[in-house]
Image (spheres, rainbow, N blue to C red):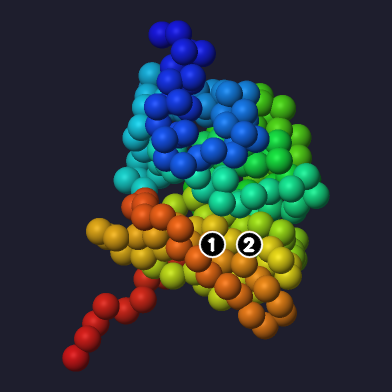
Amino acid sequence: MDLNQARFNMIEQQIRPWEVLDPQVLDLLSVVRREDFAPLAHKALAFVDMEIPLGAAANQVMLAPRVQARLLQELALKKTDKVLDIGTGSGFMAALMAHQAASVLSLETDASLAAQAQANLQKAGATNVSVRVADGSQGATADGPFDAILLNGSVAQVPTALLQQLKVGGRLVAIVGDEPMMRATVVTRSSDSSFTTTEPWDCNAPRLNGFTEPSRFAF
């Protein structure tokens, strides 16, 4: 396989047509080697428009390239930003954000995935990323507040605890809702007590571990 051609095709045929037009994001996808973050057994799938399995659980995946790229675009990171990354997975999103932000704290509930992600990030030279085995649903209060928070998977609703860890002007990006219709959701903290929310596009994704589901029971 010609990896550079496969990478070019991924960007031009999957990512750019999905309204990812930020030149910084597109350039990053050319530089950060996605195949180095895919498990050895699935390296051939690194540039395919699909979720790549990472572990034994069905929800342990690398999200599809176009979804990751568009989430990154929504974050609109700046070089001074302090980022909280929830659901480290393979570490690929943390590596991308490391290029755009001052620092990234990445939380992963699965210790083996966290260890592999740390190794992947070290190999990629992402020295401003810290990976921690922790429950991401509660964030990292002692390390906040953050300019940006990314959830690498879906949740039924965004916990208030995470929103409270945003700086004023900070934004949280997640995929929110239930099958068959979830929405990419961008929440911006506009003041100490107010938030604005937009839902720019539809997207389904596996659930993140550790986030509670609202009760479905009805009388």
Quarter holding the C terminus is bottom left
Label 2, residues with CA under 10 Å away: few <14, some 14-19, many ≥20: many
Q: Amino acid at mark 2?
A: Arg
Residue 164 location, x and y as percent?
65, 74
Q: 18 or 138, which is in the foreground?
A: 18
Left of 165 or right of it: where is 48?
left
Please tell me in which quadrant of the rendered image residue 29 appears: top right
Q: Quadrant of residue 145?
A: bottom right
Q: Amino acid at mark 1?
A: Val
Q: Residue at x 65, y 42 (%)?
A: 97
Quarter of the rendering occupied by the N terminus:
top left
State the SS at label 1: strand
Measure the C-alpha gap from mark 2 to mark 1. Answer: 7 Å
Which residue position is annotated with label 2?
A: 171
Q: Is residue 40 above or below residue 92?
A: above
Q: Is residue 207 visible?
A: no
Q: Please tell me whether residue 75 is drawn above or below residue 1 in the rendered image.
A: below
Query: Upstream in the sequence, badge 2 or badge 1?
Result: 2
Residue 20 to residue 154: above or below: above
Residue found 71% across the figure and 59% down from its top: 147
Percent from the top left, x then y, of residue 207? 38, 56
Labelled pair 2, 1 in contact (Cβ < 8 Å): yes
| Apparent side of residue 172 relative to residue 191 in the rendered image (left or right) | left
Q: Is residue 218 visible?
A: yes
Residue furthest out toward the left? 219
Query: Residue 189: percent from the left, percent from the top?
Result: 65, 71
In the image, what residue occupies the spot 36% across and 52% down?
203
Which residue is the site of mark 1? 186
Nearest the viewer among 107 and 163 is 163
Report crowding for label 1: few under 14, some 14 to 19, many 20 or more residues within 10 A (C-alpha): many
Vertically, is 69 above or below 74?
Answer: above
